[in-house]
């Protein structure tokens, strides 16, 4: 029997077990975490408590160091494995899948934009100490200013979104110098200059801790400014993979939500849904109803198709992320970005359709709050608004008709 979250934290189900050494082993570990989270996901969503226990579960499972260097005790896995793990956890609890996905992104951020020395230092730090990342990098809020004081940079302002930062050990800050240059820096969360507003009260993804943060004079040195050498940023095309990566993380979350919804609906249909007795060919059980069977077949087929596309794109993106940073070309970057745009829009549509139509397949009583199938729709409906999916369709259309590749931006 799967342990509850409290039981898992008390008994440490992975204590005494060696960490997985293969991709399949790590995905199985993520599925174990997902099963624990799924048991009381609805109750925890409704309670809305700070997800500190959930983050500890991720740490205990080893998933937080999944892409960390093996020489420092990390999993040493590629992003193909990480994206599958995010998808698996999201099937059990999409809020915690989002926290894991964003953590892994920010753990990789120093590799995306940092210098070789910064990469080595940060990866050793977070992997050996099993530290959790959050981010305050909402690009539409250009309200985190940086003042230069000699060799010190001082961040002041705020961000209306800071997913995961309130339950993190480290937070990635993004601010702007007076001349307009953007600076990323990784700082400890536990300092008086960082306060959280606790204002995340949205329809879904309620445990993602995506509320606002105020920054009142966080100081870093120029040496900690990611990618800067002698106060000058050292640009690479590889720097611009941050947005394609997070968009593909979204794809994993959405497909996980759809998987969880379909599984929960299937259980309810098998155990509770009654056959409709008033048709021309009434059946004894819902599992014999041809319309219910056809609809489940349609939803599963579309989800399989979305997963297959996502896994193909995962492999394409992962190959670039793990190749030498200096080798990435603008052409390669553009091609993977348009493929990610396609994968994301398909995942978005599959998840929205699945989480909506499961009510047609489970019956009127399944709309009861005690059943909680609304959790899946609330989660995908909330996160799918992160950025308009219509622009992803346009990007793919421009590539199809005129061969235009997406150019790097804060959302492309």
Image (spheres, rainbow, N blue to C red):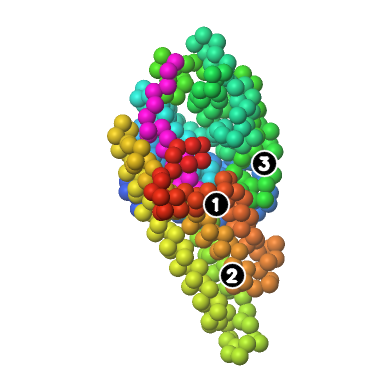
In the depicted structure, whether residue 361 falls above or below residue 352: below
298 is within the stretch colored magenta: no
Q: Which residues are magenta?
A: 231-254
**Coordinates of residue 325 in the picture (x, y in percent):** 33, 33
Residue lying at 61% horizontally and 58% vertically, measured from the top left: 377
Mark 2 / mark 3, whichever is N-terminal: 3
Residue 184 can be seen in this image: yes
Q: What's the distance in space between the residues labelled 1 and 3, CA to CA?
A: 26 Å
Residue lying at 47% horizontally and 63% vertically, measured from the top left: 303
Q: What's the distance in space between the residues labelled 2 and 3, CA to CA?
A: 31 Å
Task: State the residue lying farthest toward the bottom.
Answer: 280
Residue 268 - label: 2
Whether tag 2 and tag 3 are in contact, CB under 8 A, the answer is no
77 to the left or right of 300 = left
Q: Give the total number of marks visible in the rendering.
A: 3
Residue 64 can be seen in this image: no
Residue lying at 51% horizontally and 23% vertically, measured from the top left: 181
Q: Secondary structure at mark 2?
A: helix
Q: Quadrant of residue 139?
A: top right
244 is within the stretch colored magenta: yes
**Coordinates of residue 133 in the picture (x, y in percent):** 51, 34
Read off the residue under disc 1.
390
Q: Nearer the viewer, mark 1 or mark 2?
A: 1
């Amino acid at each position: 029997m799967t342990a509850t979250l409290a039981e898992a934290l008390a008994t440490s189900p992975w204590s005494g077990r060696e960490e997985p050494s293969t991709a399949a082993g790590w995905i199985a570990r993520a599925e174990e975490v997902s099963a624990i989270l799924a048991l009381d996901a609805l109750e925890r969503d409704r309670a809305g408590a700070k997800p500190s226990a959930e983050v500890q579960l991720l740490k205990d499972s080893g998933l937080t160091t999944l892409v960390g260097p093996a020489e420092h005790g990390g999993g040493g896995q590629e992003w193909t494995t990480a994206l599958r793990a995010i998808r698996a956890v999201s099937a059990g609890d999409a809020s915690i899948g989002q926290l894991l996905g964003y953590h892994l992104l920010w753990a990789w951020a120093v590799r995306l934009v940092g210098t070789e020395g910064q990469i080595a230092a940060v990866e050793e730090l977070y992997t050996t100490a099993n530290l959790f990342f959050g981010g305050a990098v909402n690009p539409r809020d250009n309200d985190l200013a940086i003042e230069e004081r000699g060799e010190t940079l001082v961040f002041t302002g705020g961000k209306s979104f800071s997913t995961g930062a309130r339950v993190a050990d480290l937070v990635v800050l993004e601010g702007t110098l007076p001349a307009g240059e953007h600076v990323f820096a990784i700082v400890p969360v536990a300092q008086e200059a960082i306060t959280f507003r606790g204002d995340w009260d949205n329809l879904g993804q309620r445990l993602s801790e995506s509320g606002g943060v105020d920054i009142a004079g966080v100081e870093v040195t120029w040496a900690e400014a990611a990618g800067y050498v002698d106060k000058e940023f050292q640009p690479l095309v590889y720097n611009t993979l941050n947005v394609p990566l997070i968009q593909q993380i979204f794809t994993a979350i959405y497909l996980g939500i759809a998987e969880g919804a379909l599984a929960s609906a299937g259980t309810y249909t098998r155990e509770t849904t009654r056959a409709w007795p008033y048709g021309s060919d009434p059946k004894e059980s819902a599992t014999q109803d041809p319309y219910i069977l056809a609809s489940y077949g349609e939803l599963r087929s579309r989800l399989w198709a979305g997963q297959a596309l996502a896994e193909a794109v995962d492999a394409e993106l992962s190959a670039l992320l793990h190749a030498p940073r200096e080798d990435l070309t603008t052409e390669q970057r553009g091609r993977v970005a348009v493929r990610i745009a396609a994968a994301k829009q398909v995942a978005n549509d599959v998840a929205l359709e699945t989480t909506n139509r499961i009510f047609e397949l489970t019956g009127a009583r399944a709309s009861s709050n005690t059943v909680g199938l609304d959790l899946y729709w609330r989660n995908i409906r909330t996160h799918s608004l992160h950025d308009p999916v219509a622009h992803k369709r346009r990007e793919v259309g421009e590539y199809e008709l005129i061969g235009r590749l997406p150019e790097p931006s804060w959302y492309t």
